[in-house]
Amino acid sequence: MALGERGGWDKSESRYCGVETDFNDDMPHLLSFNLSSGGFDFVVASLMDPNYRPSLMEKDIGGGSHVLPFAGSDLVLSPSQWSSHVVGKISSWIDLDSEDEILRTDSETTLKQEISWASHLSLQACLLPSPKGASCANYARCVNQILQSLNNMQLWLRIPLVKNDDDTTDFIPSGDSWELWNSFRLLCEHHSQLSVALDVLSSLPSANSLGRWLGEPVRAAIIHTDSFLTNARGYPCLSRRHQKLITGFLNHSIQVVISGKLNHGVPSVSLDSALDHTGTNVESSQRHSLRPYLDYIAYLYQRMDPLPEQERFELSYRDFLQSPLQGHNPLFHIISDEFCTIEFSNYYLSFQPLMDNLEAQTYETFEKDSVKYIQYQRAIGNALVDRVPDEEASSLTTVLMVVGAGRGPLVRASLQAAEETGRKLKIYAVEKNPNAVVTLHVSELLGSFGDNELSPECLDGAQRFLKQDGISIPSSYTSFIQPVTASKLHNDVIPCLCAQVSPLEAISFSSKCALALQVKSHKDVVHFETAYVVKVHSVARLAPCEPVFTFTHPNFSTKKSNQRYKKLRFEIPSDTGSAMVHGFAGYFDAMLYKDVHLGIEPSTATPNMFSCCASSSVCFVESYFDTGLQIPAWFAIFFPLRTPVCIRPGSPLEVHFWRCCGSTKVWYEWCVASPNPSPVHNSNGRSYWVGL
């Protein structure tokens, strides 16, 4: 492992580091030198002699086949070596959009030959060269053709990390390399096997511009040796901005690749008897010239702040969609490869708090969230003290109704609050589930979007039992949304992958299994008109959150309605550049009583609760692990767009959200009005609704 251990827990792909190499027809030596002597985990190596041109290849008289100048036979390495330690580098000279017809034809032929060879070798990825000009239509067309019949291999498109506000480059007239990537992936129909490898250069764009890439499918960051500075001891180092960028990439499972030549005069004493970052002696005669750069990246990796215990617990949930579709759909799929055979159920979690009775396992999950019930206990205690003066504490009894009392914690929290404040309390527990009432515990009404679990309807129904001066806890709650770039989430909005795999299975099954599932899946309107519960991680938050719907309790208005409509306008910072909006992340903030609040909206999130699982969309983990952790109660909610919207600098994003109420169901509708209108999603609740 090139970058060493990071507290013994990090299992992400970012712990591996590669090196870009020149063409070498002795692949065993190339691999041995860079892995054994250099300490790298994999090589990004050319698969074909760079001097090869199909138009110059001499054919035998009979017009028969000829041997292509590949970098060695497929037999010189074992299949596992090819698969685990080699990323194919497609010839950099190819230019499929050249005006020269011979070059264009040679480029297309060579690209297909090299991809075919890489597929035969079972490589996991190939690095495609950057487009040579502003127009990349023919290049993208050819790559898209290849993607249609490609196996599980990923294609990494090399893109320089450039955004010049004033200048342009020869190959990026707009000065923004994101535009080049966006044009290419649009032409390739957002294919999930097309990813990005960013060339990190000596100068970097603004922080907002860099932030866009965290929501894109970036698989590798190629750091050039000329991007490194020299420290006082003569060793390579990176600027603070570069350090922050690289650690951010490492935190998002983006692999680092070192590229270039030795540009630093490393002190000779370090070459005589050097220790690598794992503490192993490296002989000077065998020391790789790029080893100092690898050691520095390893140093950055190992000094990263360890994730809090809660974040480590949530790792397997990152960017894993949980679908709140109606009912249960027990369809089964069996996926096999040489590593595993897995059978899993396409089991959509119930999101129907009034229609369905929750299972005991679901209640148990909710009840492990101690933070939520601590906040409720504080709010109840404060309300009791406000309503009952000390001199009447022994004589006056307050009546409290728990609406939706399942199996417990709110009832216990209420009794504990009464005991701590010395107030007398009489509790009515209202619960429709006869199985839950037996053990008298409690279920929560607030969801990831505040009102998405029918809290307004439930509390309004119970309001007739409340005095005119009665108190409701929560007293109010507001939903929030923000536009996000979320390429992975958007690609995962497919019917066979939502909320069907437990974290234990998600950790254990191989990437081949996941890709096989994706191949068998299809995209449709229904799944792009459904809101998903997700621990958002690989996203770019393009603008601050804006409030959407607010509900206040009690509500004694004679014209009250729980229908809502909101028009929102988001301004993307001008230095961000263009960005792609794949959907909206949703949050909530609830005022329980006076200054006691509870929520996951990023700027005001309750500690240990932000980005946690929505209460009705139960986390699976407790069935498989007994961790003893305090388990938070909510993740964010994700509203996808059927067609992603590209936002240009200075162009505001206008969004419309509706909360609609019918006689038997409640549902959301949403759309983009500007800069490019989108269809109204989930019209009349045709795809996603909550039953009354």
Image (cartoon, rainbow, N blue to C red):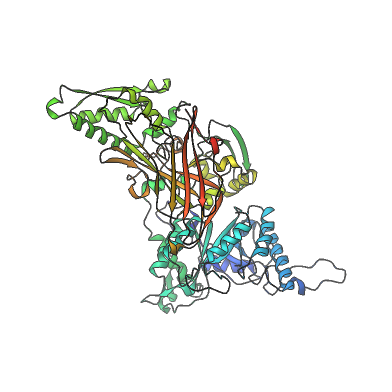
Toward which corner of the image does residue 303 lie, by quadrant?
bottom left
- Relative to 611, is 512 on the left or the right? right
Residue 5 in the image, given as x and y percentages of width and height:
43, 57
Q: Position of residue 545 (x, y in %)?
A: 40, 50
Is 519 above or below relative to 420? Answer: below
Q: Position of residue 74 (x, y in %)?
A: 69, 61
Q: Residue furthest right?
A: 62
- Regarding residue 192, the answer to whether it shows in the image is yes
Task: Residue 236 in the image: state x and y as whole percent.
Answer: 42, 73
Left or right of 409 on screen, residue 22: right
Question: In front here: 20 or 144?
Answer: 144
Considering only vertical position in the picture, is 611 above or below 156?
Answer: above
Can see residue 537? no
Image position of 516 with respect to 56: above or below: above
Q: Residue furthest front?
A: 559
Q: Say how many tags the image has.
A: 0
Front position in the image: 260 or 582: 582
The quadrant in which residue 42 appears is bottom right
Residue found at the far left of this picture? 391
Residue 428 figure quarter? top left
